Image (spheres, rainbow, N blue to C red):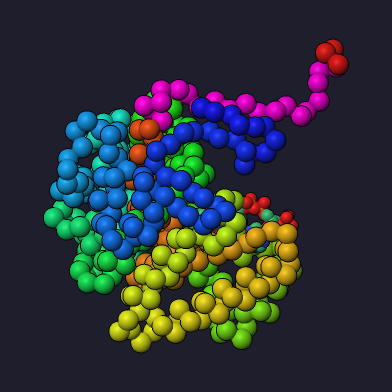
Amino acid sequence: MLIDGIDGLENIVAAETVLSEVDGQAGRLIIRGHSLDELAGKVSYEAATRLLLDGFFDDLPADLAPALGAARAAVFAEVAYVDDRLLALTPIEVMRALTARIADGEDLDTALRLIAAPAVFTAAAVRRQAGEAPIAPGPTLGHAADILHMLGKHPSGPEAKALDTYLVTVCDHGLNASTFTARVVASTHAGLTSSIVSGISALKGPLHGGAPGPVIEMLDGIGAPGNARAWIEAALDRGDRLMGFGHRVYKVRDPRADALKKAVRLLGEGSNVLPGRLAFAEAVEQAALGILKDRKPNRSLQTNVEFYTALLLEALAFPPTAFTCVFAMGRSAGWIAHAREQLADGRLIRPQSRYVGPRPKAAA
Ligand code: ACO
């Protein structure tokens, strides 16, 4: 672990990684030697996962799809343990609780079960909360197609392609809050389940992966393009943050926003509803960017991944309460790869805090 500086958390380099680089000045994301453009919409989630895991497991198969399908089928047994108390919680709390039932380990089987878990448990939670029976996975389907199948939707066609594009787009992203959390826990050798459950917990917050649900609330609250300015000004006057805008690292537009906007546009071809919704969202985005620029001229607050995530997942008919779970379905591969990379490094992550409180009188 390297410590570059102590002046601000932004300057602390807490890990070296071969997995991804987020260039916040250029607005570029590299995932294991490939630009996001080379991967999103071009390779499957299974292929992106294999790319991330390559070199971290001796027994990694050349084609990950059958093994990931088998892992989905294996974890489905846990769905039987959803009870009424769990069902009263949010989908991500249900999914996290079921994920925590997977035995801890550091091997490939455990890893694949944990990558499969958010997909299988979210689909089951969403269906149970809608009063419907869970649907068992189809292990021979692709991962994205099977998610739609488990939700009772059509597993082929443009929806599966759009979801696959989304999962690849968010599969890894440097040392974000949830990945850092997952690495810290991995570094203690607690096991991959502990690591991924911690990652899910960090992702859940609205400043990280919990933003896309509130993006839909914002769009619904605005209602029509002509209301955008007044609604946004009032929200900022109250001290609210605009969900889907701003990023700790990106000072220019988040490249994932455009990858997802493209996926929404492709999905919208042939639909009567989606092009209008997209045009509305673009109008809100433009209003928000203009107002943020006026109000915070010294900050560069740009559209982040969550804005078009919201639109895409809404178009795929996920309930907004489950949007963060879908993020976890994609990010689980990145968390596992980072956890294994941390284990290979072998060191416990143990940063220092700087004490700024009072000294005991005797020592003063
Ligand atoms: N809306 C309004 N103002 C904002 C926003 C926003 N979305 N984001 C930042 N600001 C303002 C802050 O109020 C602050 O103003 P100040 O300097 O006058 O105090 C300034 O911009 C800088 O804010 P910081 O909190 O220092 O920025 P930070 O890098 O810590 O925050 C974050 C990044 C948490 C993503 C922030 O931009 C935010 O809260 N965005 C909204 C939530 C969101 O979209 N989260 C998803 C992020 S992407 C992801 O995690 C996958």
Hey, which residue is sitting farthest top in the picture? 362
* Relative to 10, residue 213 above or below: below
- Answer yes or no: is residue 103 visible: no
Decide whether the magenta segment is chiefly helix, strand or loop: loop
**Residue found 81% across the figure and 21% down from its top:** 359
* Relative to 184, residue 200 above or below: below
**Residue found 54% across the figure and 28% down from its top:** 2
**Residue found 41% across the figure and 30% down from its top:** 342
Asked if the stretch drawn in magenta spans residue 102, the answer is no
- Answer yes or no: is residue 297 visible: yes
Q: Which residues are magenta?
A: 342-361
Q: Is residue 71 left or right of residue 169?
A: left
- Quarter of the image for residue 325 reads bottom left
Residue 211 position within the rendered picture, expressed as x and y whole percent measured from the top left: 52, 60
Q: How many marks?
A: 0
Q: Quarter of the image containing the C terminus? A: top right
Residue 235 position within the rendered picture, expressed as x and y whole percent measured from the top left: 68, 70
* Relative to 183, residue 88 above or below: below
Q: Is residue 63 left or right of residue 275?
A: left
- Quarter of the image for residue 104 reads top left
Asked if the stretch drawn in magenta spans residue 356, the answer is yes
Residue 225 position within the rendered picture, expressed as x and y whole percent measured from the top left: 57, 84
Which quadrant of the frame does ligand 1 lie within?
Answer: bottom right
Q: Is residue 219 left or right of residue 80?
A: right
Q: Is residue 29 left or right of residue 130?
A: right
- Front residue of this view, candidates 130 and 326: 326
- Front residue of this view, candidates 118 and 7: 7
- Front residue of this view, candidates 141 and 266: 266
